[in-house]
Amino acid sequence: MTRTRKLLVPVLALALALGVAACGSDSDSSDSATGPDVPAELDGTWTLMNIASQGAATSLPNTVEAPTLEFSDGNVDVFTGCNSGSGSAEIGDSTIEFGSIALTKKSCDEMSNQVETFVSQTLKGETGYKVQQGNLIIEGDQADLIFVQE
């Protein structure tokens, strides 16, 4: 199992680096709402479509159930591809401050666990975000998460 895990990490990193589709346009003309409530543009359920790195995006493996986010009343409900949970989420004009997200502790296959780890690490602390061409892009240190609205 340890050898399999060591091999899957580089495979996921390679998939991110080789990406299969370009990520959005360079500009966004939409204005972001402010206030303690969820901005209208973030209302609803968002499903992870792509992970973008270095100007390219890659889709999730077919074997992984797509992670989701749903914002409401200063909180976020999360499905990470393996486990689900919730936590606080303070939404600003261009940032989201994620509090601790409490997740269930179900064990899944190796690839789902890796996607969960990546998503969980991205949804920590203050992260940049934008809504561009109808997609929610959450900016991570290593790569961006691109969500589509259900």
Image (spheres, rainbow, N blue to C red):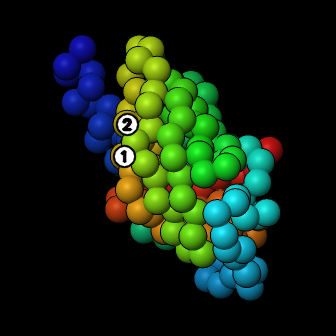
- The numbered disc on residue 121 is 1
Residue position for label 2 = 117
Q: Nearer the viewer, residue 11 or 141?
A: 141
Label 2 SS: helix
Q: Residue at x 57, y 70 (%)?
A: 92
Q: Position of residue 60 (x, y in %)?
A: 56, 40
Q: Residue at 41%, 62% (x, y): give it.
A: 126
Query: Which residue shows up at 19% across the image and 19% down it?
Result: 2
Residue 114 location (% of width, % of height): 38, 33
Disc 2 residue type (three-letter):
Thr
In the displayed structure, 37 sits above or below 28; it is above
Report the quarter where the C terminus lies.
Answer: top right
> CB atoms at circles 2 and 1 under 8 Å apart?
yes
How many other residues sit within 10 Å of disc 1, few (<14), some (14-19) or many (≥20)? Answer: few
Q: Is residue 115 visible?
A: no
Q: Nearer the viewer, residue 27 or 45?
A: 45
Query: Residue 75: x and y, percent?
Result: 59, 46
Quadrant hosting residue 129: bottom right
Secondary-structure class at tag 1: helix
Position of residue 109 measured from the top left corner of the image (x, y, whole percent): 43, 17
* Residue 39 shows up from this direction: yes
For label 2, the crowd category at 10 Å Cα-Cα, with few meaning under 14, some 14 to 19 and many 20 or more, is: some
Identify residue type, mark 1.
Gln
Number of numbered labels in the structure image: 2
Q: Please say if 19 is above or below 30.
A: above
Q: Residue at x 57, y 32 (%)?
A: 79
